[in-house]
Image (tube, rainbow, N blue to C red):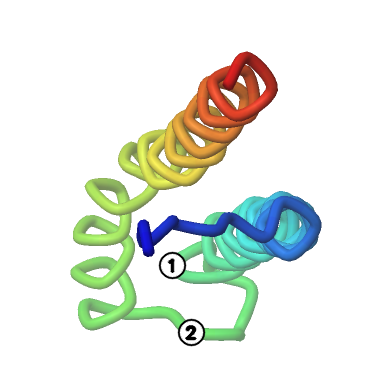
Amino acid sequence: MEAKNTIEYEKIRSKLNELKELTKRVETNLNNMNSLITETVGQNIGVWDGESANQFRSSWTNIENEIPSYVEIFQNQISNIQIMLEKINQNDTQT
């Protein structure tokens, strides 16, 4: 008896959709957090001011610049999973 690998396409598609939704939420949350920090920290409006706020704000700039790359990593993995799924599905339908 020959062993076969089985792929549950619907479960993978469901998880893929879930990953897409979570990626959107991560992007939205990171952008909202970034806006909140840039608009309130070290802006002399009484939320968080002073030297520690300025130091945090300065360190946040590095993170702020990396936010698009974080989202891109998720999006690339979604794309990789979609491509893998399509190729496996094509192979399964040909055999």
For residue 35, say whether it is visible: no
Q: Amino acid at mark 1?
A: Gly
The secondary structure type at the circle numbered 1 is: loop
Which residue is nearer to you in this view: 78 or 43? Answer: 78
Q: Nearer the viewer, residue 23 or 60?
A: 23
What label sits on residue 42 in the rendered view? 1
Position of the C terminus by quadrant: top right
- Residue that label 2 marks: 48
Badge 2: residue crowd in 10 Å (few <14, some 14–19, many ≥20):
some
Going from N to C along the chain, the mark reached first, 1 or 2, is: 1
Whole-Å distance between the Cαs marked 1 and 2? 6 Å
Q: Is residue 88 left or right of residue 77?
A: right
Q: Which three-letter amino acid code belongs to the residue tagged 2?
A: Trp
Pointers 1 and 2 in contact (C-beta within 8 Å): yes
Q: Which residue is drawn at the image coordinates 71% and 51% (left, top)?
A: 9
Which is more toward the observer, 44 or 76? 76
Image location of residue 29, percent across then percent down = 67, 65
Q: Position of residue 39 (x, y in %)?
A: 63, 58
Res. 66 mark = none
Q: Is residue 52 left or right of residue 3?
A: left
Vertical position of residue 22 compared to residue 70: above or below: below
Q: Residue at x 43, y 67 (%)?
A: 42
- Residue at coordinates 62% horizontally, 61% vertically from top-left? 26
Q: Residue 75, image x and y in percent? A: 53, 36
Position of 13 relative to 71 (above/below): below
Residue 22 at x, y = what percent? 69, 63
Q: Give the answer, above or below, for where 25 lies relative to 67.
A: below
Q: Nearer the viewer, residue 51 or 90?
A: 90
Residue 17 visible? The answer is yes
